């Protein structure tokens, strides 16, 4: 129902998103995007020094700023580019990054500057799509936060952990949790378009995401059914616990959707690593320069939320 296409690259002139299937009559203004775009900006010690204005350029609206049932395109200009930082990786690709696989798939002429399409820069387009999706969802509410960094759940220590990793020329990963309330009943299908599969499909599209779990996830596999079953306590289907994360049989049950996402440590680190150099034909030391986040998980919080919103908007449109 919603056809979403992102375009551009990290060091292209612009990045953006085109959405087809957006219902008519939705007001989309620049101010509407400001809060979520701000959540994505680098702000802490150890996060990338690259700064972009990220002012949305919205196309496809009528004269009053409303959607028209045609496509909506939202663009962001890239003004802070330093493509020269990435020339080395054409023959000495970064480990755990997409440099090698992208050039194998798209050819040696593919521009991997800034990570190309695999860059975290592309997530600005995902955030913009999420803003549109939230307008479509209406009263659905999101509470998304960083639950842990490098195995630590103490939010007060997060900035120090990121800064320490950056000082050590290293990086750390984290876990993001998204809770969604006021979700309508009956979204999703029993099998291939289950609510979980549609949400997870989009979450795994976010660069750096390596794991997705709903409700009590993998911890629930360690318990007995008598311990984790969600007892129904009223005629509306409210449950005493929410170990299934608001979804049964692929269909939303009216309780909060709870989904957690594992974000890997940033692969671009300044510590010397030994990895294959295609120009020399041997494993050789690599030191990565450029501007990189020591932890991408904090800035991924709003991106995770955007993709859950986009999935729910798609599911809502399917039921009318």
Image (cartoon, rainbow, N blue to C red):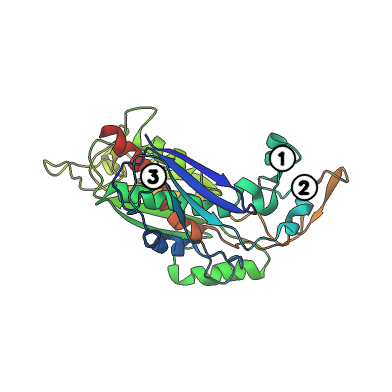
In terms of sequence position, does the residue under pointer 2 or pointer 3 come before the other? 2
Q: Residue at x 61, y 66 (%)?
A: 165
Tell me how far mark 2 sits from mark 3, CA to CA.
34 Å
Tell me how far mark 1 sits from mark 3, CA to CA.
29 Å
229 left or right, relative to 43: left
Question: Which residue is situated farthest in the front direction here?
Answer: 63
Question: Which residue is situated farthest in the right direction here?
Answer: 280
Q: Which residue matches tag 3?
A: 310
In terms of sequence position, does the residue under pointer 2 or pointer 1 come before the other? 2
Mark 2 near mark 1, Cβ–Cβ under 8 Å? yes
236 left or right, relative to 198: left
Q: Which residue matches tag 1?
A: 103
Q: Which residue matches tag 2?
A: 90
Percent position of residue 221, x then y: 39, 40
Q: Which corner quadrant holds the N terminus?
A: top left
Q: Residue at x 30, y 49 (%)?
A: 26
Exactly how many numbered labels are in the figure?
3
Mark 2 near mark 3, Cβ–Cβ under 8 Å? no
Q: Residue at x 88, y 46 (%)?
A: 280
Task: Tell me the quarter of the picture where residue 49 sits.
Answer: bottom right
Percent position of residue 14, x then y: 58, 53
Percent position of residue 269, x then y: 68, 59
In terms of sequence position, does the residue under pointer 1 or pointer 3 come before the other? 1
């Amino acid at each position: 129902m919603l056809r979403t296409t992102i375009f551009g690259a990290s060091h292209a002139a612009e990045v953006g998103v085109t959405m087809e299937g957006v219902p008519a009559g939705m007001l989309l203004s620049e101010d509407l995007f400001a809060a979520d775009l701000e959540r994505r900006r680098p702000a802490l010690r150890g996060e990338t020094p690259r700064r972009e204005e990220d002012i949305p350029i919205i196309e496809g609206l009528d004269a009053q700023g409303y959607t028209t049932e045609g496509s909506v395109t939202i663009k962001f200009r890239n003004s802070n580019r330093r493509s020269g930082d990435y020339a080395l990786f054409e023959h000495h690709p970064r480990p755990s990054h997409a440099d090698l696989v992208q050039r194998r798939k798209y050819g040696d002429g593919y521009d991997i500057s800034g990570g190309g399409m695999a860059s975290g820069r592309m997530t600005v387009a995902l955030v913009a799509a999420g803003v549109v999706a939230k307008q479509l969802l209406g009263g659905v509410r999101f509470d998304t936060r960083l639950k842990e960094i490098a195995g630590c759940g103490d939010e007060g220590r997060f900035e120090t952990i990121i800064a320490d990793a950056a000082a050590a020329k290293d990086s750390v990963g984290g876990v993001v949790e998204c809770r969604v309330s006021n979700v309508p009943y009956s979204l999703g299908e029993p099998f291939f378009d289950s609510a979980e599969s549609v949400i997870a499909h989009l979450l795994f599209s976010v660069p750096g995401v390596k794991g997705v779990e709903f409700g009590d996830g993998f911890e629930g596999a360690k318990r007995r059914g008598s311990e984790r079953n969600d007892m129904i306590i009223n005629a509306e289907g409210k449950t005493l616990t929410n170990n299934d994360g608001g979804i049964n049989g692929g269909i939303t049950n009216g309780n909060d959707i709870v989904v957690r996402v594992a974000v890997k440590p940033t692969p671009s680190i300044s510590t010397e690593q030994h990895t294959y150099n295609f120009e020399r034909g041997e494993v050789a030391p690599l030191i990565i320069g450029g501007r990189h986040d020591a932890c991408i998980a904090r800035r991924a919080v709003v991106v995770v939320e955007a993709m859950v919103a986009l999935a729910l908007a798609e599911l809502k449109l399917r039921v009318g």
